[in-house]
Image (cartoon, grey):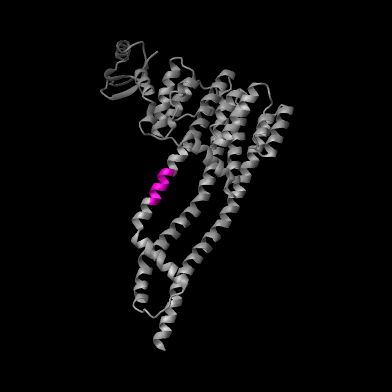
Amino acid sequence: MPIFDYKGLDKQGKTVRGTIDSENARNARMKLKRDGIFVVDLIDKTRSAAKKAKSGGPKARGGSVNVQDMSMMTRQLATLLKASVPLVESLSAVAEQVQNPTLSEALSDIKNMVNEGASFHKAIAKYPKIFSKIYISMCEAGETSGTLDVILIRLAEFTEAQSALSSKVRAAMIYPILMFVVTTALLMLLFVFVVPKIMVIFDSNPDLVLPWYTKAVFNLSGVLVDYWYVIAIAVTLFIVVFLNWIRTPSGSVQWDAIKLRLPIAGRIIRTVAVSRFTRTLSTLLAGGVPMLGAMSIVRNVVSNEIIARAVDDARDNISEGESVAGPLKKSNQFPPLVIHMINIGEKTGELETMLSQVSDSYDFQVKTEIDGLTALLEPLMIVVMGCVIGIIVFSIMMPMFELLNTGTG
């Protein structure tokens, strides 16, 4: 039955607002008139919701929903459902509680769809930019099994764990990037503004013989000053070509393969991918999603095409009756511990538990490695920056001392 938002005046002339269920707008006005309300404005929310769903919903118009908003909303909805509050009323309550306007508007539309008879997972599927494939698939499994409240709790925990891991990786990269930018800016300042002024002093003394390292610094400074635009164009061109290359199917695969072979970062990238794989697969299987469907979804969360292709191959072999551990082992992309734990989980019937334990272990390993790498990079970057600047200063000061000695002598 359609739902209408109304604005009107009561018998005392006060403005009143609310919602009413009715077959059509005419009947809605008659009901409100019987209740002593003079209707000023009447909006069919169901029709409005359908239009928004066709256009891609609030997210398509530029709104954004962060992980914290999604996690809090999911937990609130799960709590209400666990307390036996009907789904429509739960959605209505959560829509009013949510601070994010994009998510609140989407939940209101979803509530209207569910109120008209649509299933929850089909309603949220109208908003693919807000609700991921994992979210939709698990909600479908939860509705089918009658455990939607339990599934939503697992989804909230899964979202928080993935967010914490991603935040840890991003935070670890901030300091090295910042140090690199500061060092580059400082060197450019020295080479472009300081060194050329000192060169003028040395050029005015033709008898002074400059050492090779000083000449090298001056030559580099001259190149940067005279050909900075050529360097800028070359760097920009390289970045554009590189970005276009990694967007191509073959370039993406080759770049992902290179990343996995990097000395220290490669191990961390693989560990993060394995952690995402095991945690997502565990969450999906525990939520009642079939293995083949779960493998199709989980290949999109590993963020590495090499490992994703290994998951695809494993899925094809599993569909032919093989175990999970066997095909993953053949790919040579998963550590032996993961294969061993999955093998034990399959034999004991506790695959979800084993996958969750592996994910916890690898999350801890990622955090430990990142902490160690950060602790190593901080002094290393300072030493490198100090050495580079020290070499430049030494290259300038040595001839300067010689010039002063010559002048005094």
Stretch in magenta: 234-241
Give the residue displayed 42% in from the left and 31% down from the top. Answer: 103
Kindly report the secondary structure that dominates the magenta region of the rendered protein: helix
Q: Nearer the viewer, residue 151 or 299?
A: 299
Q: Position of residue 7 (x, y in %)?
A: 29, 22
Q: Position of residue 297 (x, y in %)?
A: 55, 28
Picture quadrant of residue 351: top right
In which quadrant will I find the N terminus?
A: top left
Q: Position of residue 128 (x, y in %)?
A: 45, 27
- Determine the residue located farthest toward the bottom in the rendered image: 409
- Give the vertical position of 220 relative to 353 (above or below): below
Picture quadrant of residue 295: top right
Q: Is residue 57 left or right of residue 329?
A: left
Q: Nearer the viewer, residue 167 or 268?
A: 268
Q: Is residue 237 magenta?
A: yes
Q: Is residue 232 left or right of residue 356?
A: left
**Can you see residue 41?**
yes
Give the residue displayed 70% in from the left and 39% down from the top. Answer: 337
Q: Position of residue 254 (x, y in %)?
A: 53, 40
In which quadrant will I find the C terminus?
A: bottom left
- Give the vertical position of 19 relative to 164 (above or below): above
